[in-house]
Image (spheres, rainbow, N blue to C red):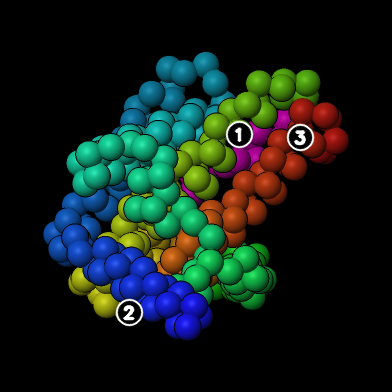
Amino acid sequence: MTTDILSQQEIQERTVRTQAEQTGQYTLWQILGIWALVALPMALLAWVVFPTIVPYIPLLPGFTFLLLMIAGLGWQFIVSLVIIYRELGTLRWGAIRQRTWLQTPRDPKTGQANLRLFWWLVPCGLFAGLIGWGIGSYLDAPIAWLFPALQPSKLIDPSQLISSEFQGQWWLLGVFVVLSILNYFLGEEFLFRGILLPKMQGVFGKYGWVANAVLFGLYHLHKPWAIPSNIVGSLALTWPSSRFRSNWMAIILHGVEGIVQMVIVLGVILGLMP
């Protein structure tokens, strides 16, 4: 009898959660509007602001570009907070966590939290690695053929930062910590997987995760040469986040990239990089 009551309660709770997720879904224009609010400023910083100011900034061009991207990611965080406050009327952590799926992965059948679902990160991570360090260059090749002018400039080559002049410069690590927090948690993931993904089913139905990956890839107007690989690689972020209603899935997978960057930066600071 007690089991039956608990089962009924679980069903009711799951129904309430499903109804809450289905209400307030974004329209196509709202989705595209939010995308434009973050994609266009990043493109403006990369294609207009950067070439305008770089002759007058006494920094390595690659580092100047990095700072501009950090500013753009900070803007994404601000946009996300404004959207959250307009929707919920509060910025309480509990409300934000529920709205943006910052929760333990949920079983698709029962709606119950299950830590074992994090094991899905293994195949998703392998897929992301295959794209990032394998076939990604082949996916991006058509962009180079069709639009040779859109290839990355040597001015923004991140290898500029692998220099002996940064040896012992621990402030550089602080810059990359800020970059990582904004890029993999409070910026891109917060907005695309936290704000947009839960509200895209109204337009795209069960393929909202695919549409989210496409939007995320096209958001990279500041790096258009890598849009195809970003679209395909992002499927490894959007599918588990959507399937298991947990933004932590995408944050962890995307954050691996940040860990690699941190290791490289530490190597530069300690003088271990050539």
In the depicted structure, whether residue 249 falls above or below residue 189: below
Q: Is residue 122 visible?
A: yes
Q: Is residue 109 magenta?
A: no
Identify the residue under disc 2: 206
In the depicted structure, whether residue 99 falls above or below residue 129: above
Q: Magenta region: which residues?
A: 152-164
Identify the residue under disc 3: 266
Q: Is residue 234 visible?
A: no
Give, as a three-letter code, the residue at label 2. Lys
Q: Quadrant of residue 134?
A: bottom right
Determine the residue located farthest toward the right in the rendered image.
272
Q: Nearer the viewer, mark 2 or mark 3?
A: 2
Query: Please, what is the dominant secondary structure of the magenta stretch?
Result: helix
Where's residue 18, x and y in %?
Answer: 31, 70
Label 2 to label 1, Cα distance in Å? 36 Å
Identify the residue under disc 1: 176
Where's residue 78, x and y in %?
Answer: 33, 35
Instruction: Determine the residue positioned at 43% across, 17% down.
Output: 56
Question: Helix, strand, or loop for circle 1?
Answer: helix
Circles 1, 3 touching at the beta carbon (< 8 Å): no
